[in-house]
Amino acid sequence: MALGELLQRLTRFDRYLILCLSLLVGVSFLLPFGRQAGARLIVEADNRTVFSAPLDTPRQFAVEGPLGMTRMEVRNGAVRVLHSPCPQKICIGLGEARRAGDLLACVPNRIVVRIEGDVEGAAYDLLSR
Amino acid sequence: MFNRPLIPILLILLVALLFWLRQPAGESMVSRTALVMGTLVEIKAYGEDRAQLEETIDTAFNEMVRLEQLFSSHLPESEISRLSAATGSFAVSRETAVLLELGIEMARLSDGAFDLGLGRLKDLWDIGGENPQIPGEQSLRRALHGAGPAALQLEGLQVRKQAPDLHIDLGGIAKGYIIDRAAELLLQAGVSSAAVNAGGDIRLLGDRQGQDWRIGIQHPRESDATMATLNLRNRAVVTSGDYERFFVRDGIRYHHLFDPQNGRPARGCQSVTVVAADAASADALATAAFVLGPRAGLDLLEQLPDVEGLLVTADGRRLATAGIESALEWH
């Protein structure tokens, strides 16, 4: 049966229904690619989650590790270490974490910050450095 | 039924929708981090059984901690510390022997640019430590005594050092070996899609849900930027750069990648990224190519089978091996 012949047998209502459902299926395929990346930060101290917050709300907070308090700041959709009691301050030099999958860590003070969200929005899955 | 084709068309749409909705339910991703080997290690694994993934990742982390206690030169009771302290022939475990054998082979392939015997040199500079310093010529010569491609002889599990006071440092290879072991454990447990990332040294298992893993490569001079993306599956990626651990004195950057010929930081490159089948080889080759400099470093990577790489020269030029072009996007 030719396609043209098939279509001629459809009523106007049928065609509208098929069009609407096709659009619905099409949109459902595209939905996951439009999700927001990097929605939340998770802070772990000594391998335990101690703090979690959305990345879109500016704030400062501090987390205690074995060396003392590590102070962090959330601003402009990113988190960074402001102050750390560790000797080398490498964690401050790491800069900002803003994309899903980004990680910050203060190894001497045993603090880890990671960004959780949908990785489809991120430019990469893992960073080699 | 086909006289009015609405129903078959609706059925086709329904099947398409159900097929799509089934996809995310099939696999879940578990991501866990832990501090091991003085660095942040992240394991991401995909699979259908979330509880089993969690358990397998725990096993992998435990294995990494066990191997760290074997290979660390900072732990006085580790096998490597006891080998450094030994004055005669010393028996090591099978795992240490395998790693030393690979290290000796890398030293040979790189004409000594990769060196397992730089323990005293690294202690002397103390880069990344509390008292970094620029040693004098005599101190450097003393620290390099006994180092070189022939520094260690391995016969079975027996190791003999060329000089009794030689201190072994596996910093340029052990991290890669340990993440390889973690990846092997994941694979043995039936995980076919995973990534083990130890502070930027990465071992990939399979793909990421049917797609390549996208590996961002750190820009050596812009801490918040990447310079390239590599699209890879089932590979290891390791980057060595002069920005990882360093101090600056009188405008000169002193970093942790030393040239064994003179005991000073190698000056030819800003960073080297190596892609190989295993992370231990990639780790050692990234250090070796960095020390050799752009021309000899790239030649080394080109001549080895199944090895590719990117290199940023000291003046900022970007070079790549021919075989990596299809996986590479420069930024």
Image (cartoon, rainbow, N blue to C red):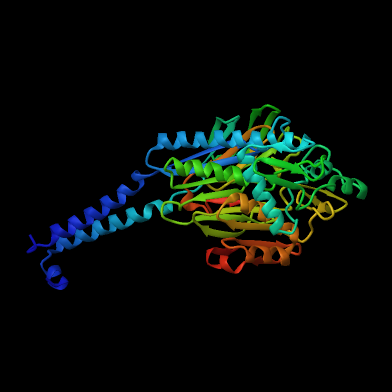
Image point (48%, 44%), residue name = A117
Residue B140 visible at all? yes
Image point (58%, 55%), residue name = B216
Work out whether A3 lies above or below B305: below
Image point (71%, 41%), residue name = B159
Work out whether B187 lies above or below A31: above
Q: How many marks?
A: 0
- Residue furthest front as drawn: B155
Q: Which residue is nearer to you in this view: B117 or B330?
A: B117
Residue B287 visible at all? no
Rendered location of residue B165, percent (x, y): 82, 40
Q: Quadrant of residue B156?
A: top right
Work out whether A1 lies above or below B12: below
Rendered location of residue A57, percent (x, y): 55, 39
Rendered location of residue B75, percent (x, y): 71, 32
Quarter of the figure that contains the N terminus of chain A: bottom left
Rendered location of residue B273, percent (x, y): 64, 57
Q: Which residue is nearer to you in this view: B192 or B19?
A: B192
Q: Which residue is nearer to you in this view: B318 or A80?
A: B318
